[in-house]
């Protein structure tokens, strides 16, 4: 079973996807972390932005690996696990820029499908339902208004001891949204058959419960479909 969850930054995708995967006892695939890892790896090995053609040949040769361990994605560089360093503001900016390039998207789409092979998962990102897993069993597009998303980001930063201005965060999120929506390849948009869910006024538990209900509805309707075809 594949559950594809897409949406803009701060819509609650990561927390909700992680909880949902835990509840369903399946892999949580954070594809944003994979884009961040590519940005980190490029910075580590080149210190600049190689062009698309060069990236297409370089990326498969880097000592960057993706694996599944304990139902979670494990990202490593020369065998060393990458984690918090992927969250640095400079990496966030670089990931957003590099995610525009077809070479990067093709490289990571290949990895994402490989990691998903033969297992159930909750995959979270920007193009899960539209490009990577178009046959997903459940497709969800999470949104929330900009002010709510900026507040959530500020709370996240605060919990890590970093204080920042909500207006500045809102501007940064809006710029990232624009870049994600307007890019040529795999732009951020809901799949035609995605369920849209505005999380602005919902708690995390409410969102997870709503997704479990949607999943249940899907299962019931596909069971009906099978019965109808059998009759
Ligand atoms: O979700 P995030 O903030 O960790 O994602 C980091 C960047 O990667 C973000 O700018 C959008 C991009 N991304 C993408 O283009 N496609 C995905 N499936 C996941 C993330």
Image: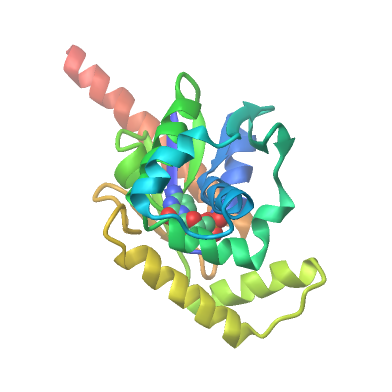
- Residue 80, position as x, y percentages in the image: 74, 36
Q: Residue at x 55, y 37 (%)?
A: 62
Q: Is residue 174 left or right of residue 85?
A: left
- The vertical placement of 71 against 32, above or below, is above
Towards the viewer: 41 or 155 = 41
Q: Is residue 107 left or right of residue 37?
A: left
Count of labels in the image: 0
Q: Is residue 198 visible?
A: no
- The vertical placement of 19 against 43, above or below, is above
Q: Is residue 37 visible?
A: yes
- Residue 31, position as x, y percentages in the image: 51, 45
Towards the viewer: 226 or 93 = 93
The single residue placed furthest to the top in the displayed view is 230
Q: Is residue 75 left or right of residue 10?
A: right
Towards the viewer: 136 or 82 = 82
Q: Residue at x 40, y 33 (%)?
A: 110
Q: Could you tell me which quadrant the N terminus lies in?
A: top left
Q: Residue at x 37, y 33 (%)?
A: 137
Q: Could you tell me which quadrant the C terminus lies in?
A: top left
- The vertical placement of 88 against 78, above or below, is below
Q: Quadrant of residue 114?
A: top left
What colouring method underlies this structural image?
rainbow
- Residue 118, position as x, y percentages in the image: 46, 18
Q: Residue at x 26, y 19 (%)?
A: 226
- Residue 45, position as x, y percentages in the image: 60, 48
């Amino acid at each position: 079973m594949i559950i594809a969850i897409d949406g803009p930054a701060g819509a609650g995708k990561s927390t909700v996807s992680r909880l949902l995967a835990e509840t369903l006892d399946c892999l949580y695939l954070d594809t944003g972390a994979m884009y961040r890892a590519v940005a980190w790896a490029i910075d580590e090995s080149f210190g600049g932005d190689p062009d698309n053609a060069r990236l297409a040949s370089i990326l498969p040769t880097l000592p960057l690996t993706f694996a599944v361990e304990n139902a979670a994605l494990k990202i490593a560089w020369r065998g060393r696990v990458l984690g918090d360093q992927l969250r640095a503001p400079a990496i966030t900016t670089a990931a957003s820029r590099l995610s525009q390039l077809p070479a990067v998207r093709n490289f990571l789409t290949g990895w994402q499908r490989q990691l998903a092979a033969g297992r159930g998962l909750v995959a979270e990102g920007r193009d899960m339902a539209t490009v990577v897993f178009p046959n997903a069993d459940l497709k969800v597009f999470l949104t929330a208004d900009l002010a709510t998303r900026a507040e959530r980001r500020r709370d996240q930063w605060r919990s890590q001891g970093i204080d920042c201005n909500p207006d500045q965060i809102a501007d940064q999120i809006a710029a990232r949204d624009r870049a994600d929506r307007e890019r040529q390849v795999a732009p951020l948009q809901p799949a035609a058959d995605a369920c849209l869910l505005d999380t602005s006024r919902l708690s995390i538990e409410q969102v997870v419960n709503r997704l479990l209900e949607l999943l249940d509805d899907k299962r019931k309707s596909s069971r009906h479909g099978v019965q109808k075809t059998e009759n």
